[in-house]
Amino acid sequence: MGNFCATRTGIIIVGGSIGIMATLLQYLGNPPNMGICVACFERDIAGALGLHRAAIVQYIRPEIIGFVLGAFIISLFVGEHRPRGGSSPLIRFFLGTFAMIGALVFLGCPWRTLLRIAGGDLNAIVGLAGLAMGIFGGVLFLKNGYSLGRSQPQKPWSGYVFPAFMLGLFLLLLFSVSFSEGGPIFFSASGPGSMHAPLWISIAAGLIVGVIAQRSRFCTMGAFRDVMLIRDFHLISGVAALLIAAFAMNLLLGQFKLGFEGQPIAHTDHVWNFLGMSLAGLAFVLAGGCPGRQLFLSGEGDLDAGVFALGMIFGAAFSHNFAMASSPKGVAAFGPTGVIAGLIFCLVIGFAMRERVKS
Amino acid sequence: MTAKKIDARGLSCPQPVVLTSQAIREGADALEIVVDNEVSKENLLRLAKKYNMRADVREENQDIVIQMSK
């Protein structure tokens, strides 16, 4: 039995489907140009848990939960659930932290970058250029023998931990649990955190994406990396399909507005849009996957991917608490500091983790 | 000619492909790569197609062995 989703046609259909679902999620209530954003949504989860207190971005996003659980369920079904881990988890945690810091300076992960472009937000072209630049840097490290080392098979139940954590979050959301007066779980009353599609639609969409993305090995970073590293256009065909489908849907749904100024949940600081996404792109390459891919892997039992995702949640909390996260007004006081620190970290790791001299 | 052996178990994307394509560029025309997951297998089969190499897959214990030759 072959894996149709992993064929060229399959991944194009998957990418197109994701583009359609994301724009529909926006239509049904998710924030503008943010039908799906792994970085923003993990940040919203961090907020809901009280890890940061930015009141306008607090909501347990079911899409993230669906990504993990959908990948978990389908991987069990097809026999690809394989607990493994131990490949430099601490480094991966901080790669996730800095990837998020970079993404929150730009205000989007690669998925949202594509959706913003599909919505007419030209600032996201700058972000995409930065992402490509960061990925290119990561590719150079890969060519020079960069590796975080082999992972080891882990015991079966270790592969259930991250899905169980996600299920726990879903229950907290479903029952609107409150742990104390004025305490978490927080639900934004205004701002992007208050904009969300109906819960059941979000979780269903997340589960479907989790399934099809796991099967197709969809990865927005790998798409660019493979073109640069091995001239392979397989993954990028899926990304192109996402972009085209989202663009078409936005035109249909009246969600398209072309320009730099006044774009929703976006700013026009071209330098830091570029550099923020460069950091994110570099970190994703060094960690082996875009943030969506890391969630699908974590559902499959990849503990290192789970650690990366937790690093991103930590990074979101850090970013908002330490005035690093941008807003529509522009970059925050320590956003540039965070990006520079992250780039230094990634460069050090890129050089330090080489395994052989380039031949 | 003996096949160049590559142990790519425990290595995640893109390393199995990087190691294999490097070996091919260095002149190996027969390779035997051991991986432990479907994704690596799929990626390597795609690589073989790209380099116009023949690829045979067999399972050995829990692992997947891909034999590539020109």
Image (tube, rainbow, N blue to C red):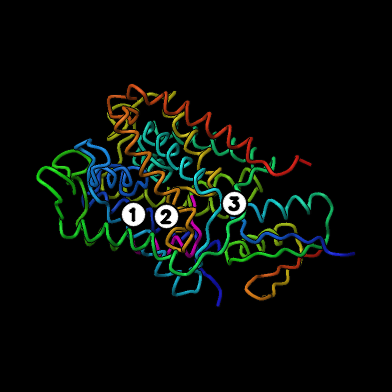
| Residue type, numbered disc 3 | Phe
Q: Is residue A218 magenta?
A: yes
Q: Is residue A34 above or below residue A264?
A: below
Q: If the image is split into quadrants, where does the N terminus of chain A sit?
A: bottom right
Residues shaded magenta: A205-219
Q: Is residue A182 above or below residue A127?
A: below
| Residue type, numbered disc 1 | Ile
Q: Which residue lies most toward the right here?
A: B1
Residue occupied by mark 3: A233
Disc 3: host chain: A
Mark 1 nearby-residue class (10 Å; few <14, some 14–19, many ≥20):
many
Disc 2: host chain: A
* Overall secondary structure of the magenta section: helix
Residue occupied by mark 2: A295
Of the residues under marks 1 and 2, which one precedes in the sequence? Answer: 1
* Residue at the image position 52 percent from the left and 43 percent from the top: A91
| Residue type, numbered disc 2 | Leu
The answer to which quarter of the image holds residue A113 is top left
Which is nearer the eye, A46 or A243?
Answer: A46
Mark 2 nearby-residue class (10 Å; few <14, some 14–19, many ≥20):
many
**Is disc 2 placed on a helix, strand or loop?**
helix
Coordinates of residue A148 in the picture (x, y in percent): 60, 47
Mark linked to residue A64? 1
Are marks 3 and 2 in one subunit?
A: yes
Which is nearer the eye, B26 or B61?
Answer: B61
Residue A209 can be seen in this image:
no
Are marks 3 and 1 in one subunit?
A: yes
Coordinates of residue A276 in the picture (x, y in percent): 44, 31
Answer with left or right where residue A279 lies relative to residue B11: left
